[in-house]
């Protein structure tokens, strides 16, 4: 297989960022500096020496969870295998390979800190797996977000050992076959390797990272589509005056207003628009500014989590100490994942209301109802309208916070839990749903121009409309539009990954 085109180096200085985890969707070179490898190896030796001296270490000399008062198996390998086996009871849909690979990257980065007690063989196995299009097949359900993402990571660890199933590219295979075809050797677990692999919040952090990356693009898409809607109906853009938003007291709203002003530079307003537009236009800076502030807070919290150590116990070879605690309790990322969920749902509310405005002749400047090229003989975007409304309804139902749904489990050892994994995975799904609603609005804007709406006169609006027109043809006559919406999702997000923003 050809070598990966992207790389990440753990050198003790670089911080892993949420956007980095998107890079793991394709093969990536993950390397660890000599000093980092030395720290990992030293910690593994310290764990062995500490255990050999007869000191109690959770999971090595003891059972797991509420079985901590019982002695572990004398066979360390059997103890580790038993851990993975009893945790492999997950259910539900299998994670998409990009999510599973992001989880591997997050776990490797945390263990690279040299406080987890894992052997260098684990880091090497994770790095090798990330260098090829390999991903473990991991069921979605099984973690309550405390003691780490135990079940999902157990499936990943087992797959690295050749047990269970894995993906190579898009093909789902027996894990052993996927390893062999990917040129990978099965991982041989030593000492604390099994517990070190599962005892972290890697899936929670990974899913939340992917959500933040998508949410950042969604904020930009929201502003660009809002600006194009302003031009399409000929509204005045003075509601986005930075001087107005500066008085709001919210810096994020002020920044958003500046971006909107740049997007609308060169636009022309019609004389017959009302003095004040509907809130779905007039309050865009306030709404999107609040979303951006939420996204940036989440980005900071998740970045901290990615660069932390979420094991138990945590080993400090320099001090000769082992501390048993609860760094695996993913409450911080659970909270911000729920906040992302709410913010993304509100962006979907905005896009759906903007689409509704665009389809209404009373408010869209006289364009045909439902943007039909031949009203009655054709239905235009009626189906797109219905689907967008249905998606928003679904998003509202799935916006219930997960981070406070604590249920005691594990013999009341885990008597309070954050459900961060479910919060993060649901937020990631919400990002996908939002993308469909925003793409539906983009299709409406493209159709409006075809039906006679004013062409944008701003540089940013002109460029975006040219791209929309190139990506999808006008709706005349009616045709199935589901594929058009999905294509616009891909194109809009690809555009945001590489497009320079107006300043």
Image (tube, rainbow, N blue to C red):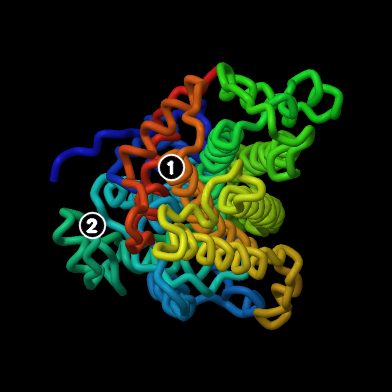
Q: Please report the residue visible at 73 percent of the width from the left and 79 percent of the height from the top.
A: 412
Report, in whole angstroms, how far the alpha carbon at label 2 lies from the one at label 1.
35 Å
7 lies left or right of 83? left
Q: Please report the residue visible at 31 percent of the width from the left and 38 percent of the height from the top.
A: 470
Q: Please, is residue 502 above or below residue 188 in the view?
A: above
In the rendered structure, find residue 446 and report the number of the disc placed on it: 1
450 lies left or right of 231? left
Q: Please report the residue visible at 50 percent of the width from the left and 27 percent of the height from the top.
A: 456
Res. 204 image quadrant: bottom right
Q: Residue 369 versus residue 145: which sits nearer the camera? A: 369
Image coordinates of residue 266 in percent, x first then y, are 56, 17
Residue that carries the numbered disc 2 in the rendered image: 169
122 lies left or right of 47? left
Image coordinates of residue 29 in percent, x first then y, are 30, 38
- Do we see residue 342 in this rendering? yes
**Callout 1: 10 Å neighbours few (<14), some, many (20+)?**
many
């Amino acid at each position: 297989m050809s070598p990966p085109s992207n790389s990440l180096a753990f050198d003790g200085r670089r911080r892993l960022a949420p956007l980095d985890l998107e890079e793991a969707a394709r093969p990536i070179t993950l390397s660890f500096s000599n000093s980092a490898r030395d720290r990992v190896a030293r910690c593994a030796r310290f764990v062995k020496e500490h255990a050999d001296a007869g000191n109690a270490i959770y999971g090595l000399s003891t059972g797991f969870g509420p079985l901590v008062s019982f002695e572990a198996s004398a066979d360390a390998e059997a103890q580790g295998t038993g851990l993975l086996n009893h945790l492999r009871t997950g259910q539900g849909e299998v994670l998409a390979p990009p999510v599973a690979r992001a989880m591997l990257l997050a776990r490797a980065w945390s263990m690279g800190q040299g406080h987890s007690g894992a052997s260098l063989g684990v880091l090497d196995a994770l790095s090798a797996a990330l260098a090829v299009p390999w991903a473990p097949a991991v069921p979605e359900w099984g973690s309550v977000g405390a003691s780490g993402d135990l079940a999902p990571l157990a499936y990943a660890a087992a797959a690295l050992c050749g047990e269970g199933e894995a993906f190579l590219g898009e093909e789902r295979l027996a894990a052993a076959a996927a390893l062999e075809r990917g040129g990978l050797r099965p991982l041989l677990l030593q000492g604390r390797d099994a517990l070190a692999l599962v005892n972290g919040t890697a899936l929670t952090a990974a899913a939340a990272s992917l959500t933040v990356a998508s949410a950042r693009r969604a904020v930009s898409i929201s502003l660009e589509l809002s600006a194009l809607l302003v031009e399409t109906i000929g509204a005045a853009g003075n509601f986005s005056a930075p001087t107005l938003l500066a008085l709001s007291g919210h810096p994020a709203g002020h920044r958003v207003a500046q971006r909107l002003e740049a997007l609308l530079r060169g636009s022309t307003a019609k004389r017959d628009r009302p003095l004040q537009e509907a809130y779905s236009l007039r309050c865009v800076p306030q709404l999107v500014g609040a979303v951006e502030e939420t996204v940036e807070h989440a980005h900071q919290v998740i970045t901290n989590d990615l660069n932390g150590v979420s094991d138990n116990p945590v080993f400090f070879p320099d001090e000769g100490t082992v501390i048993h605690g609860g760094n695996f309790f993913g409450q911080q990322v659970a909270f911000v994942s729920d906040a992302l969920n709410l913010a993304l749902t509100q962006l979907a509310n905005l896009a759906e209301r903007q689409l509704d405005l665009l389809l209404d002749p009373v408010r869209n400047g006289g364009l045909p109802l439902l943007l039909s090229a031949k009203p009655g003989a054709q239905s235009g975007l009626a189906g797109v309208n219905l689907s967008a409304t249905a998606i928003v309804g679904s998003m509202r139902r799935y916006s219930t916070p997960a981070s406070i749904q604590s249920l005691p489990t594990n013999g009341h050892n885990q008597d309070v839990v954050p459900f961060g994994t479910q919060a993060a995975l649901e937020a990631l799904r919400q990002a996908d749903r939002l993308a469909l609603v925003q793409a539906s609005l983009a299709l409406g804007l493209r159709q409006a121009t075809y039906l006679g709406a004013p062409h944008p006169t701003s540089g940013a609006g002109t460029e975006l409309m040219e791209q929309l027109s190139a990506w999808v043809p006008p709706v005349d006559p009616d045709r199935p539009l589901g594929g058009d919406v999905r294509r616009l999702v891909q194109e809009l997000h690809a555009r945001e990954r590489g497009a320079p923003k107006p300043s």
